[in-house]
Amino acid sequence: MKKSLLGIVVLILSILMIVAFLEVVAAETVAEGKPVKIAFISPEQVNESTQRQWRQLQNECKGRGWEIVATELEATYEADKERTAFIRVMEKNPDAIVLAYIELNPIKDLCLEAESKGIGVYIVGEAWVPGMVGSFKSADSIIGAQITNYALERLMGSAKNVGFIDLWMPRGIRRDVVAAALFEKGVYDVGKTDHHKLTPEGYTDELFATVSQWLTKYGKDLDFVWVCWDLGGITAAQAMAQAGFTDPNEMFTVGIDGGSQAWSVIREGKIPFVASLAEPFEYMMHSCCEAIQQVEVEGLKPGDGKCIVPATRNVETSYMTKIITNVNVPAIGTKIYEVFDNYGENPNDPNSWINWGEPYTVQEFQAN
């Protein structure tokens, strides 16, 4: 009787082991013999952030032997255009859809639809929503606090008047709220803050006009203008310079993103845009592609010990950011990875991901 019972136990354990083995093999061979099919959606390729994300995705696909089957590079911040772009790429039946800096409210239901069809949805630069595998970004509240702290230290904790350009996008709101709290909660000696909320239509001209109005109102007593991204900060500084304020010791502005344009402006020193918090956009996209490899090819699940995507679904990169000023501004021709200490990779290793494709290099940019 005991031998019969022991035999049954051994048989059951053998069956369980076979089933487990088959599950692992099935997970690892989802795309065996076929290139992973990728679709990419981003806003217009105006900001260097989206340009660099797109370039890195192409580098990743080249290095991994993947195929880009669909792209939508002009999904502007309009609900109908975003939905149309998402539907078009979903119809191509890719293995994964990669989004970069897309407004998520208009497409939340489409993310769930893609998930139901077995298509992995990944977002770079924005927060995770249901239906997505993971998000790859810096925490906006943290990077907003980092560059705000730099500005307050430069002001030596005191300012007469401060202008706040408030962005409508969720990632901008998260940065703006933290910056406003530091300036307005009585921790520092700040006389007055003046807020203006941007609207999506024609926001660059609106920003320039708003700062010009503040300069008419406050003159040299406007010490600082908060704008939560580089091109906005540069626009504010251009308004200051046009009004005759070019000395950063009189008034200044800062930004978040990093790249050739912002660094050229800082390097030239002609307008009072003095600092940019540089984000590791290439590493964000690399992490996203690592997740695609693990989840779509190897069959790992978010939250598994070996999966790059944690149970929270957010892969965080705030710890890699760097504040760039005229003291440490990268030289023209610098490979972007060098700005971030090569992300711990060996730059002489031809097989390292930082050497795949055509890495972004710091370029000369003619600032206005």
Image: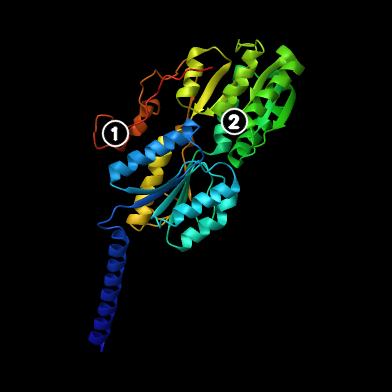
Where in the figure is residue 251, as x and y percent of width and height?
64, 15
Of residues 235 and 282, the one drawn nearer to the viewer in this rendering: 235
Residue at position x 23%, y 85% in the image: 3
Q: Secondary structure at mark 2?
A: loop
Q: Is residue 185 visible?
A: no
Number of residues whose C-alpha sits closer than 10 Å to that of mark 2, classed few (under 14), some (14–19) or many (20 or more) = many
For label 2, the residue is 228
Rendered view: 217 above or below 99: above
Of residues 357 and 287, the one drawn nearer to the viewer in this rendering: 357
Where in the figure is residue 317, as x and y percent of width and height?
46, 38
Rendered view: 295 above or below 55: below
Number of residues whose C-alpha sits closer than 10 Å to that of mark 1, classed few (under 14), some (14–19) or many (20 or more) = some
Where in the figure is residue 179, as x and y percent of width and height?
64, 31
For label 1, the residue is 355
Q: Secondary structure at mark 1?
A: helix
Amino acid at pointer 2: Cys
From the viewer's perspective, tell me whether residue 88 is left or right of residue 168. left
From the viewer's perspective, tell me whether residue 197 is left or right of residue 127. right
Where in the figure is residue 34, as x and y percent of width and height?
28, 56
Q: Is residue 346 visible?
A: yes
Rendered view: 228 above or below 124: above
Of residues 6 and 159, the one drawn nearer to the viewer in this rendering: 159
Distance Cα–Cα, label 1 vs label 2 = 31 Å
From the viewer's perspective, tell me whether residue 99 is left or right of residue 4. right
Amino acid at pointer 1: Asn
The numbered mark, 1 or 2, whose residue comes first in the sequence reads 2
